[in-house]
Amino acid sequence: MWQPKIIAFLCNWCSYAGADLAGVSRIQYPPTIRVVRVPCSGRINPIFILKSLQSGYDGVLVSGCHPGDCHYLTGNYYARRKFALLKALLEFIGIEPGRVQFSWVSAGEGEKFAQVVERVTEDIRRLGPARYLIKDHGAEVED
Amino acid sequence: MAAGNRKNSVVVIGAGIAGIQAALDLANAGISVHLVELTPSIGGRMAQLDKTFPTNDCSICILAPKMSECGRHPNIILHPYSSLLSVAGKAGDFSVVIKEYGRYVDPNRCVSCGLCAEKCPVKVKDEFDMGLRERKAIYRYFLQSIPSTFVIDRDNCLYLKRGVCRLCEKVCPAQAIRFDDCDRTVTVDCCAIIVATGIDPFNPIGYGQYGYPEYEDVVTSIEFERMLSASGPNRGHLIRPSDGKEPKRIAFIQCVGSRDQKRNDYCSSVCCMYAMKQAIIAKEHDKEIETTIFYMDLRAFGKDFDKYYERAKSQFGVRFERGRVARIKKEDGRLMLYFTPDEGRPRREEFDLIVLSVGLVPRSTLKDLAETLAIRLDRHGFIKTRTFQPLATTRPGIFVCGGASGPKDIPESVMSASGSVVECFRYFDRKWPREVSKKTYPQERDIIGDRPRIGVFICHCGINIAGVVDVKKIVNFAKNLQYVEHAQDLTYACAQDSLNLIKAKIEELDLNRIVVAACTPRTHEPLFRETLREAGLNPYLFEMANIRDQCSWAHMEKPDEATEKAKDLVKIAVAKAQNLTPLQPLKIKINPKALVIGGGLAGMVASLAIGDAGYEVVLLEKERRLGGNLRRVYATLDGDDPQAFLKRIITRVTSHPKIRVIREAEIESITGYVGNYRTKVSGEEIEHGAIIVATGAVELKPEGYLYGKSRRVVTQLELERMIPELPRYRNVVMIQCVGSRDDEHPYCSRVCCQEAIKNALRIKELHPLTNIYILYRDIRTYGRMEEYYEKARNRGIIFIRYTPERRPQVYLKDGNDRYSTLLVKVFDPLLGDELILDADLLVLAPAIIPPEGNVKLARLLKVPLNREGFFLEAHLKLRPVDFATDGVFMCGLAHSPKNIEETIIQAKAAAARAITILSRESIDAEGTVSWVDPLRCQGCGYCVSVCAYAAVELKEREGRLVAEVNEAICKGCGVCAATCRSGAIDLKGFSDEQIFAMVTALRG
Amino acid sequence: MELRSRIRELFQKGEIGSLIGYGRGTLPLSARPIFITEGGVDQLIFDITCGVNLAKYLLRKKPIAGQKVGIICKGCDGRAIIQYLTEGQLNREDVYIIGISCPGMIDPNRVREKVRGRVVTNYQMNGEEITLSGDGFQLTLPREDLLSRSCLRCRYPSPPIYDTFIGSPKDRVEIQDEYRSVAEIESLPAAERWNYFQSEFGRCIRCYACRNSCPFCYCDVCFVDQTNPQWFGKGVELTDTIIFHLVRALHTAGRCVDCGSCERACPMGIKLTLLSKRMEREVRERFDYIPGLSVEETPPMAAYREDDPQEFIQ
């Protein structure tokens, strides 16, 4: 079965800890994600997500603390606004809604983390390999 | 084990949230701590909770960082799985013997892989999950345990009991099993002891006719908490125990084991709130679930609690039924609840699951412990304390915090924990600065300009990683990555010999960046960073790839794919490492002087605590006299004399060599940051390192009820001093909730019920024949104050409940005469009819409201107020006296309404928190902080708006505004960086460039 | 002409020391911004060719000798100024806002489409029709065929704040299908949307005229020109180009006042306001915010509400 490659931006205090907990509890989920740890979901510049798509990832998962749980008090609230706009914009230009997904996973939700990865993987599998926005780096002229 | 310096250590007994907080505050003030915990892990009750009210924060999410800070603090020595054997000596010079039970697992070798438990053949009920799940005889107390290592339950281990098995020993890849282990005793010298043993949930076996434990679907609230938890026995899938079906109708029965003359006649304080929380969370699991709470009085008396209650009702549709549950009976296999409501006829309802909201009782071990410590318990079995000394036990030098002295919620436990810390300071020498134990490191190598030379170390973690991931393949793969000079595997990267090897490789190969692919940076990054420092490398030149928790453990059946994933993770980590730069956290010098704003009870207690600990204090009072609201209080429920107490502390404050009082103080400006504040007050500039806000609150001036129109209408505070001279009235009427719990002030003022009952009892004392009527909405005499409610009823004081829809009406009996007797009309729900009371005196209990000055002060301090205008703490649960801004704390009514005892506790807590800063010469800011490229900044100010810590400011630079980050304040969240459109702000350690490198590492 | 006499009066009274307004351009259908003192008043014009958003010309202009800078403000110029005030780019007291009601501005790209290569030398308005003429041709078209799409859906023809007003301010206009262009795209299947934008942005030559004309692209160094990190490639590679436009839409979200400058400036006639309009609707529906109306309100991307909708988050 085709395994998509999904980049996952996880906030250090909740979702990354939730991912750890899934492992500690030996909850199995598809080996599709590549994790980038960030201090807070509020750290995530929407450009990181665009860059991920351009770099050839089949999907992007972004996960942070539940509203109210943010280690930095309000970071996820600002993140939520950014993500809402980015999501609307991507879908507007025709990127499949399942390509870029968002979740709140707490440090205690190992099970949920696994389910989220499961679901995102399933969605992206259904969509097939990414086609849009991928840059052909063979033809690269920058740098 | 090092026993610490006698003159510099404290023993804390119990490592729940209170013990953990006390240990951390002590340790951060430079005092070494022995933290003794009976169970194999620190964490306590809070670790068992799913969520916490009133924010529904995930409990373990907020607790775990504190646990791990405790676990790695150089000043804290953990004694898990231990108990206290004996105490000798006296305050300032105790000798304590601690018994450490044999774990039969070497904690220095155990890597917490869990293979042993997998193979262990013995199954027993799991205590942490309240017996709802089984564990093995070798086990970890809970998933996030600290220490995380396993332990063998000697009572159930086959080998220890019968001499057969030893399976765990065979499968342990780290050779950590020690069947020859035994109990040890450790003697510790210390100056003071803090008891933080917490509470037990009331055991309802045989209680009432509730069918516990015969009916499987009648569970206790703590069992239900585990059932709700994502890490609980059903992994957060809410099913009922009998048949595994999802319950659709859940009942909560309040006051099980509380407010009961036969058992515990106190109120457990927290059950109303936790029941609402559980009802809400249950609904979040499944919107279809109907939840009903059966209660007597709804006691939502804390900060933001009433709003939670309103939300439970209106937003979540939780049903509230007032009355008594007579019994629960199983009829035709269905659970039937028999209920006698306050109003209406008894009835019967069916439920799928019934939760008993069990009260909090003293820890079962407390009685023996009290004997060992030679301290007295109260008649309920909690540790005895007094109103004005709420943290002192009956034995000098031994203090108490948390639930051990009576029911408390989490923030109250945390406050009392910090407060108890302050009590210990008097036994220490006043050395300054008090530094945490120092370690010397070699000179840091300058690597700026050198090309990256990366060392990659891949950990097997025994077979935890290597059993799934092909480690050798990863090593070969890593060797070929750009800038990688060296790659190798290690059996256990965290073992001391491996750490030594990493150090040797750094020196031998001139490595300047290190990648370790192993477990999670959340637990192990500090250890490896320390290793880099020891090898003369800046600790920030380190990156981890998590190939265990997030790879081998999650993909155990897919070795090939796990190996591919691990390769990618290593490649991503190396990409980041290529871009790492050394970071130098700012050292912030501390001015060891505090500024306390407000000279009422809270401000004075805080000032004295700080002054007594040896630090200078400037105490500001806006009026000419010290004392604040306490000047108007003449009695306490327990019969103490507040005025004598007030006089004593005013004398102490005004004569204290370390305290300077500025009266009629007017603050003009406050600038600076933690350790370095400058405040202009009444024309003078004061430099100081910490700030305590204790500006109090005021009584609302009542509107209506003829207040101000009739001489016969007074407030409870006005009544206080009238009582001794009070004539022998026939009828005195008291109205509660005047301006509280309404739309304008949607909160409970907390103290009015106690105040009314206190004053009613005082009047009864003087004039037993006076009739006293208290018109109330809910009587909220939480904790031990319930006794006085009971006493008041026994004395014939009449309580009549009213609803906000039918408030009492007051009018003059005799036209316009200001001296006329009053008539009070109230609907009595028990009679189902209107009563007209002839009142010689009407006493109102007005709301406690924040003073107007809060708004200005909040602006000067750049700290937030909540919607009601009280100061808003950094975190409702775990940082109840801190602001998000470092170095600024709050206490007393400025935070929210509270009584004298609670004010004293919070004031001491604020003092302790301030001392954790004042006691040090300098503190390290974060290394990962934001910085601004002024050439790119356009001064739009978005970064200023989004910073939760007020760490970013716009400053004039060459004629235009440019953002500037104060590194001393920045916490490194990076929200500003992600918000900046012009790429002018970046976050060190998680820079745009580093994240870009990670994002693009796998392309092409 | 009322415009010139009123402005002269302002100079004479000392209300303003200089003025940003419009003068006749080299091309007949597009006026150019001019920065004048009293002596230049006679160059001033105001008509349907004054599309350029003037607000941007105010940035970093300081009052000369204590005298304010005057600026002719249509609705969108005025709203841009309000947005500048929320972003700390201007001091209110340095600026003298001269409000003027906007009749809607011509989009040179749309004209070009209609005249197919012929050079327009003159135009005339007759009610709802505009007659274009040039060497050997005359073309009469309805106004809505030539006006900027942004102007046709404009709800705020007059600036929300001003110090004086020439003529009388017009109330907010109710527009039925303000987001019609967006909805039309949205009605297409996803793959067709992608194809559409791919062909639309495929024409982009990365000249940055959109950015340079945008009142909100005021960064000294645009993200796309930065190194360390180099956010995206600078060549005309399609994904880089699309991402440039996406990021620009995100950067102007909650700020863009739909003045249409970008679209009028684009030499390739790319429908650039599709993206910004899509963002505008999202910000309005989600965060209940319309840019350029209030100085007090924090811009939406620097604010949050605890109960912001989050239906897209698992």
Image (cartoon, rainbow, N blue to C red):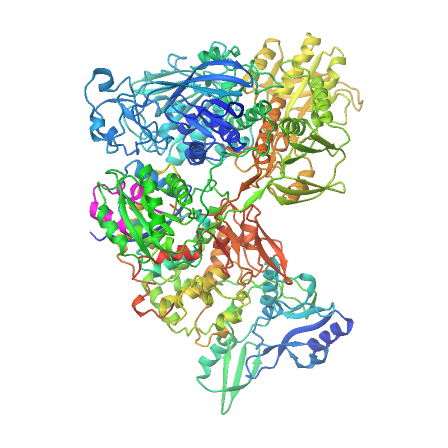
Residue B212 found in image quarter: top left
Rendering coords of residue B386 (x, y %): 60, 16
Q: Quadrant of residue B146?
A: top left
Left or right, B280 with respect to B153, comes to right
Question: Is residue B731 positioned above or below C199 on the image?
Answer: above
Q: Would residue B560 be counted in the magenta stretch?
A: yes
Say which residue appears at 58% left-offset and 66% top-offset.
Answer: C76
Quadrant, the C terminus of chain C = top left
User: Residue at 38% of width from left, 51% of height from top?
Assistant: B513
Q: Residue at x 61, y 12 (%)?
A: B792
- Which of the two residues, C38 or C24, is positioned nearer the viewer here? C38
Residue B342 visible: no
Point out the stretch of residues depicted in magenta: B544-567
x, y (%) of residue B138? Answer: 27, 25
Q: Nearer the viewer, residue B454 or B670?
A: B454
Q: Nearer the viewer, residue B418 or C67?
A: B418
Taking the image as shown, residue B414 lies to the left or right of residue A140, namely right
On screen, residue C57 versus residue C110, left or right, reads right
Residue at (76, 42) in percent of width and height? B683
Whole-percent x, y for residue A117 in the image: 31, 46
Magenta-colored stretch includes residue B670? no
Q: Is residue A89 above or below residue A71?
A: below
Q: The N terminus of chain C appears in which quarter of the rendering? A: bottom right
